[in-house]
Image (cartoon, rainbow, N blue to C red):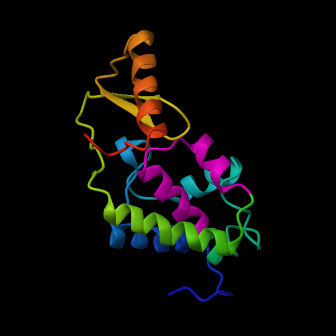
Amino acid sequence: MLLVDEKFSIGELVEVVNQWCARHGIVPASNQAGERMTERNVRFYRTVGLVDAPELGGGQGYGEKHKLQVIAVRLLQSQGLPLRRIRELLLGRSLADLRRIEKQGLAEARSSPTQAVKLEPGESWRMTPLDGEFLLVSRNNRALPPELLEQIRDLLHARLTTGKEGKG
C-alpha cells in the first residue's frame, strides 16, 4: 500500500499501476492502448495533461496523486473513452476526487458484464461517438450510413429521456 507522502520513480509508478490493474482486471477497451502501462505511456500522459509533473526531476517524485491519475486514465480507457475525453473529465481533479473516481470506477467495472475486446491479427474496429456518453463499435472498420447513425442517436435519446434505458 502506498503511503500518502511516499515518493517513487516513474518505473515504480508503472509497476504499482500495472499490479493494481492486474489485481482488478482493468484493461483498455478494444486495445486502444497497450494492456500494460509503460514509462513511455506515463511520459505521454504528462505531455497531454493527464498526469501532473513529478515533484522531483529525473523521473522521480511520483506519489499517490500521480498513481490515482494513471489509474483513472486506465479505468476510463477500460470504458472505451478516448484520451481527449479522459483529459476533459480529469482536468483539475483533487486527490479526493481521484480517490472517488477509483472507487466508483471499480464498482462499475465489477458490475459491468462487458469484457475487453481483444483484436485478432488483421482485425480492426471503428468507434463512432453517438453522443458524449455512448460509442458505437463496429468490427472490421465498418462505417454506418449517416442516416442510420442519426436513427440510432434518436432512438437512444428517446429511450433515455423517457426513462426506459435498460428495458426491452
Residue 10 visible to the viewer: no
Which residue sits at x=55%, y=85%?
2
Asked whether 52 or 80 is in front, the reply is: 80
When the figure is inspected, residue 54 is found, relative to residue 5, above or below; the finding is above
- Residue 26 percent across, percent down from the top left: 37, 61
- Residue 73 percent across, percent down from the top left: 54, 56
Q: In the rendered structure, does residue 68 fall within the stretch colored magenta? A: yes
Asked whether 131 or 35 is in front, the reply is: 131
When the figure is inspected, residue 67 is found, relative to residue 158, above or below; the finding is below
Q: Is residue 123 found left or right of 160 in the rendered image?
A: left
Q: Residue furthest front?
A: 162
Q: In the rendered structure, does residue 145 fall within the stretch colored magenta? A: no
- Residue 10 percent across, percent down from the top left: 60, 68
Asked whether 91 or 4 is in front, the reply is: 91
- The C terminus appears in which quarter of the rendering? top left
- Residue 157 percent across, percent down from the top left: 47, 32
Q: Is residue 124 found left or right of 120 in the rendered image?
A: right
Asked whether 167 or 16 is in front, the reply is: 167
Q: Which residues are magenta?
A: 67-91
Q: Quadrant of residue 22?
A: bottom left
Which residue sits at x=65%, y=48%?
87
Considering the whole magenta stretch, tell me its main secondary structure: helix
Which residue sits at x=46%, y=64%?
105
Which residue sits at x=32%, y=63%?
111
